[in-house]
Amino acid sequence: MDKRLNIGILRETKNPPDRRVPLTPSQISALEKSYPIVKFFVQPANLRCFSNEEFEQLNIPLAEDLTHCDILMGVKEVDKQTFIPGKVYMFFSHVGKKQPHNRLMLTAMSEKKISLIDYEYLTTEKGQRVVAFGRYAGIVGAYNGLRAIGIRSGSFNLKPANQCHDLDELWRGLRLIEIKSRLKILITGEGRVACGAMETLNTANIVRVKPDQFLSTDFDVPVYCQIGPGDYTRNKNGQNFSFTHFATNPQEYVSTFLPYTRVTDFLITGHYWDPRSPCFFTKEDMKQPEFRISVIADISCDINGPIPSTVRPTVISDPFYDYNPHLETEQPPFLKPDNITVMSIDNLPGELPRNASHDFGMQLMQNVLDDIFTGNESNMISRATIISEGVLTGYFAYLKSYLEGKS
């Protein structure tokens, strides 16, 4: 590729607003030095975690009109009214599961002959994602759950994560609290999100224990346990657990999660859930006297999915609600002790936008952008391209009826 390549950084348009960026000012500056043919332009924005001045100080021009750009990069879904025909867009589109609220956005992109590269599907040949915000979702989700524990018990107070300047300030506040109760915390999942949640719990000096200990032992100190699908499901036919088989045939498994509900106080969900997978527990299970969970930080946030109390996403400015299991309804947060307090923010990394943006940008630089900037015929880029010049690619042909509004 020898012609100049103009890259536009979009102003985020999703509401509630997101303050993250796909690349930080210093990363853009470094990329322009490494790739002389590449020039960046940034749409001005007042709410972005990096100010307009921080870009200008590094001689990165601000431009409201990005029609001269070849590739437009954002973070979250883009307002369909702002699409520029014929361009290549890169952002998290959230259409791969046929999400109803984003269908018209994809339709507009198709009509305008746009190409869409979705970050979520940038993977290795083995299917491992190469860029993600999962670590920060886990860090902040677990932190918010601990904050809910403090409010419910009245024993400690944590500053809202979005009011912390960065991760260092969040860690400093977390190290000051003392959790005196015999709190038992459970984390589901084995990926970036779960690892991020464990960072938070480790910083709070909470002790990690094994699943069999967690299920059978009462401790004098707060503890946590991490479990994966091999711990909370079993094959219907009695076959030994295989993650590969589970990932491709989740409908052939049943939940074995119920024993954990009887010993867990605080549940943190960091798993990936397929709609064909079994639910963790039911609304009826939540009504039983032995159901012990009182706080759920549902980082996965699958609405009406495996966690019945997750009835809607919450927002950074209003992160909690109560779920009354007996009435099966939402109530104001911290209303009464018998309720279950739920945190279900679906853009958690946005609470630490500077740190999350830096890490995300580094992943793009290390794993993705060389293929983009050099025009390399990359299988990874092909796998992540949902539509090419308005047409669904072979990987995403299953979205045809969704795109046409028939499913």
Image: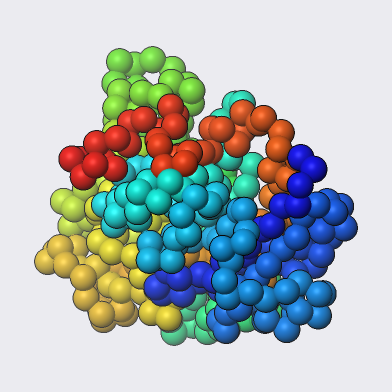
Residue 210 horizontal side relative to residue 271, left or right:
right
Residue 380, x across and y down, in percent: 61, 33
Residue farthest left in this picture: 327
Residue under the image location 64 percent in, 42 percent down: 130
Q: Is residue 168 visible?
A: no
Q: Quadrant of the N terminus?
A: top right
Residue under the image location 40 percent in, 35 percent down: 392
Residue under the image location 37 percent in, 46 percent down: 110
Which of these two is toward me, 250 or 225?
250
Which of these two is toward me, 204 or 128?
128
Q: Can residue 286 be seen in this view?
A: yes
Residue 62 horizontal side relative to residue 142, left or right:
right
Which of these two is toward me, 283 or 30?
30
Which of these two is toward me, 197 or 7?
7
Q: Is residue 48 above or below residue 20?
A: below
Residue 270, x across and y down, in percent: 48, 50
Residue 42, x across and y down, in percent: 65, 70
Q: In the picture, residue 82 is in which quadrant?
A: bottom left
Q: In the picture, residue 402 is in which quadrant?
A: top left
Q: Is residue 78 above or below residue 370?
A: below
Residue 396, x across and y down, in percent: 40, 33
Total tally of numbered discs in the picture: 0
Residue 265 horizontal side relative to residue 378, left or right:
left
Residue 330 horizontal side relative to residue 198, left or right:
left
